Image (spheres, grey):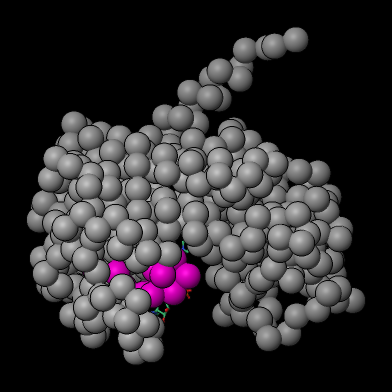
Amino acid sequence: MIFGDMGDMGHEQVLFCRNDDVGLRAIIAIHNTALGPALGGLRLYDYASEADALRDVLRLSRGMTYKAAVAGLDLGGGKAVILGDPSIKSEALFRAFGRHVASLDGRYITAEDMNTNVEDMNHIRRETDHVTGAGKHHGGSGDPSPYTAWGVFNGIKACLEVTYGSPDPAGRTVAIQGYGNVGRHLARFLHEAGAKLIIADINARNVAAAVSTWGATGVEGEGFFSADCDVLAPCAIGGIVNQRTIGMIRAPIIAGGANNVLANEDVDGQSLAEKRITYAPDYVINAGGLISVHAELHGWGPEKAMDDAGNIYHTVKRILHKAQAEGITTICASNRLAEERIEAVSRLRRMRVG
Ligand code: NAD
């Protein structure tokens, strides 16, 4: 069954890691290394079953392949999960995991993800160099959210250009759901560019902060979906665009930083296309954090990382044009773009050099 799933999804390698002394049970999935080493975060989660953990790591690692490929990075897709209670962490647990990462000798590079943080990465770094996103004092690039937000801001500009003929956010209204790490930076970039802001957040204090800082208008709950605006920017949780909420949406553009925005990529992507709502695929527009990690791996500074994240503008435009030209959804267009790049680079590497 495991080889069947790996074959169906196109995985290269899956490593099961166990260390009873520290209670480690982990899975590292390497999906595709055609473009470079497989990079993807380490998730710590109390899965209902081992099968659930395997399904999650296989799905997430494949997603990383597409994300890196469309972003134009020399990285493949990977992911890791530790099966366990997120409230029980230890130095030894992460160092044991780090030794397994070391054993892959650079084929997999790990990073922060759900329930893991800078401190955990710093433990891993004591066993292997193949870890990113460690704190600034440990040679890492630190918080990725400014880069993510800069990429989202530029992706929004691309959507505005394709929809209205001008990328300029001045005078446009953007509704942001989630005034957290990404939402806060995005609000600043948009405000500085002259956009008007509508903010929704389950935490009323966050809404109040946005209202007083940027003169934003607050909306509650599902008021976000029916907001009278040019762009809906989901920056909180996934699954919010679905068959129920699509009926409420009045904005012509959906472009935000949240992961897995569409509850069902095929069904909801098609419904949005039929309603002529432009959707910037989540994994394309929110790749700024991954781009900053890529820059960190190359030893490039924060300015180059910001420049590269800004190129999401060109990538989103290319995807929207491809979707129009081929009569397909934007998700389908970005998936095709990723597959075409992987195929082209793989073909190139068949040529022997030296
Ligand atoms: P965060 O936890 O800092 O912020 C999330 C905000 O959303 C919080 O203010 C929270 O109160 C609010 N929120 C939660 N549920 C909500 C709901 N149902 N309605 C309205 N508001 C709600 O998280 P973040 O780092 O800003 O990430 C936001 C999203 O972007 C997540 O989906 C994350 O996976 C994705 N993402 C983040 C990065 C990054 O660099 N941080 C990179 C890629 C993708």
Q: Residue at x 16, y 58 (%)?
A: 171
Regarding residue 65, the answer to whether it shows in the image is: no
Q: Which residues are magenta?
A: 175-184
Residue drawn at the location 25% of the way across and 75% of the way down: 216
Tell me where residue 213 appears, x and y as whole percent: 35, 76
Residue drawn at the location 39% of the way across and 68% of the way down: 183
Tally of numbered tags: 0
Q: Quadrant of ligand 1?
A: bottom left
Residue 189 relative to residue 83: left or right: left
In terms of image quadrants, where is residue 353? top right
Q: State which quadrant residue 74 falls in.
A: top right
* 194 up-or-down from 318: above or below: below
Q: Position of residue 272 (x, y in %)?
A: 17, 56
Question: What is the quadrant of the N terminus in the image?
Answer: bottom right
Residue 131: name its quadrant.
Answer: bottom right
Queried whether the magenta region covers residue 352, the answer comes back as no
Q: Quadrant of the C terminus?
A: top right
Residue 351: x and y, percent? 62, 12
**Residue 338 seen in the figure:** yes
- Of residue 129 and residue 337, the one placed in the foreground of this image is 129
Instruction: Residue at 80%, 50% (x, y): give it.
Output: 129
In this rendering, would 62 be left or right of 251?
right
Residue at the outermost right position = 21
Judge from the rendering whether residue 32 lies leftward or rightward of residue 121; answer left or right: left
- In depth, the one of 266 and 162 nearer the eye is 162
Vertical placement of residue 159 versus 25, above or below: above
In percent of width and height, residue 297 lies at 68, 44
180 in the magenta segment: yes
